[in-house]
Image (cartoon, coloured by chain):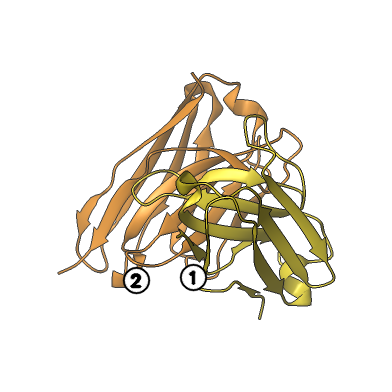
Amino acid sequence: QSALTQPASVSGSPGQSITISCTGTSSAFGGYNYVSWYQHHPGKAPKLMIYEVSNRPSGVSNRFSGSKSGSTASLTISGLQAEDEADYYCSSYTSGASVLFGGGTKLTVL
Amino acid sequence: EVQLVESGGGLVKPGGSLRLSCAASGFTFSTYSINWVRQAPGKGLEWVSSISRTSSYIYYADSVKGRFTISRDNAKNSLYLQMNSLRAEDTAVYYCARDVSVTTLYAFDIWGQGTMVTVSP
């Protein structure tokens, strides 16, 4: 059974850096580097922040960075700002020709 | 402006059917894979289905396989989701979402505003 596991919540103060992890089974990542991260403010459409593990779409702040080591992908947000408070989801293309989302992490900016 | 606009959501009884639509504008619709993603109340995002540029490749989540059918009409710049045998657990906001690249990277950069589907007696 494929699964991507994220912490339910993380928090940080303005200006600090935080990292959100996304741990997957071998089938969850499928041997590919198609790992993405989304920012989701309630009531709005999700926003793509990172794709292919570490690529930022045009317009996304360079305070957001992604990485992957072994079975864990990570999203790091540096210089935390109040507007970064949101839900964050990782996703991956799986060996089963489907896309899997993690359970989501609620980021609180203290 | 590049955008996707969903429609067709509403209240339906268990076992009923509903057809969602997604209208695209501002980009060459026929060159991108498109997906449906949903979010149940209080829950996380769940990928539902994807369709390739020419409809050659279609995939579904196990939770909807055999009940939902994705399709597209490139001439009309439109995506559809036919949902049959609906269950209470299908209650969610349904989003259509475009792949970030014409080469398909399974990352979604353009999302619609979502349409609510409620399955209830």
Classify mark 1: residues with Cα within 10 Å, few (<14), some (14-19) or many (20+).
Answer: few
Q: Report the amino acid beneath label 2.
A: Glu
The residue tagged with tag 1: helix, strand or loop? loop
Q: Residue A71 carries which label?
A: none
Classify residue A110 by image quadrant: bottom left
Dots 2 and 1 on the same chain: yes
Q: In this view, does B23 lie above or below A24?
A: above
Chain of the residue that carries numbered disc 1 in the rendered image: B
Residue farthest toward the bottom in the current orientation of the protein:
A1
Identify residue for label 2: B89
Classify residue A19 by image quadrant.
bottom right
Q: Where is residue B46 in the image (x, y as percent from the top left)?
A: 50, 62
The correct choice, above or below, for B11 with respect to A26 in the image is above
The picture quadrant where one finds residue B121 is: bottom left
- The chain letter for the residue carrying disc 2 is B
- Looking at the colours in the rendered structure, which chain would you say is drawn in orange? B
User: Tag 1: residue type?
Assistant: Ser
For the point 79% across and 73% down, the residue is A71
Residue A72 lies, in percent from the top left, at 76, 70
Side (left or right) of A29 relative to B51: right
Q: Name the residue under label 1.
A: B63
Chain A representation colour: yellow
